[in-house]
Image (cartoon, rainbow, N blue to C red):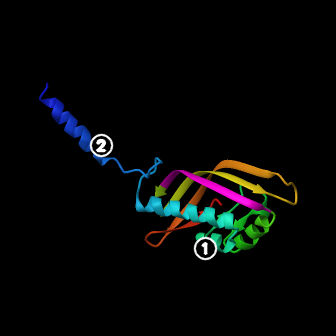
Amino acid sequence: MRKFIPLVAVLALALAGCSPKKIPGTDLDDTSDTRAVIDVLQKYRQAVEAKNTQALQQLADESFRDDGGSSAPEDDLDFATLPAKVAQRLAKISELKLDVTVRRIEFDDDAKMARVTYSYQLSFKMPEYSSRTQSENDIKQMLLKRVGDQEWKITSGI
């Protein structure tokens, strides 16, 4: 029996070495696709904070559609209306700060899509309505589409 203990230990170490490497501080596999998707979300956060609607449109795919989480058509966005509608919304906001934490990324290699589950914390002021800082936090999903070899574009979920 003692002869098998070293063999079991070697097998356990070998199997542990086969598990995917994780991005530090997360449960996300450290792959080029995972890093590319996280980069899109980082650029999204930066564009929102800078109120840069052109940068948001550059992150979006031409197939982009978003219903704003409601059945009301007034808040729907598509690729063409994204800059104007988002600029109109952001014009009412000041001191915007957005934190985004990616929780999970599910890849569909056949469809060349990724579903990102993320939590966000948003703080902002709306001087027209109140001098107090407002905050919002929630969990959302964003869909991305692979374009080319490593580029990912947002198709919904902003």
Compared to residue 55, the image places residue 38 above or below, namely above
The prevailing secondary structure element of the residues shown in magenta is strand
- Label 2 vs 1, first from the N-terminus: 2
Q: Position of residue 95 (x, y in %)?
A: 74, 60
Q: Where, quadrant-wise, is the N terminus in this rendering?
A: top left
Q: Is residue 51 magenta?
A: no
Residue lying at 46% horizontally and 51% vertically, measured from the top left: 28
Q: Nearer the viewer, residue 102 or 75?
A: 102
Q: Where, quadrant-wise, is the C terminus in this rendering?
A: bottom right
Q: Position of residue 55 (x, y in %)?
A: 63, 72
Looking at this rendering, what residue extends furthest in the left direction?
Answer: 3
In this rendering, the count of numbered labels is 2
Residue lying at 79% horizontally and 57% vertically, measured from the top left: 125
Q: Is residue 98 magenta?
A: yes
Q: Nearer the viewer, residue 19 or 69?
A: 19
Q: Position of residue 53 (x, y in %)?
A: 69, 71
Residue type, label 2: Ala
The residue that label 2 is drawn on is 16
Q: Position of residue 145 (x, y in %)?
A: 53, 65
The residue that label 1 is drawn on is 58
Magenta-drawn segment: 93-106
Residue lying at 71% horizontally and 66% vertically, measured from the top left: 77
Any part of residue 85 in sight: yes
Residue type, label 1: Gln
Say left or right for 140 vs 12: right
* Disc 1 secondary structure class: helix
Compared to residue 150, the image places residue 22 above or below, namely above
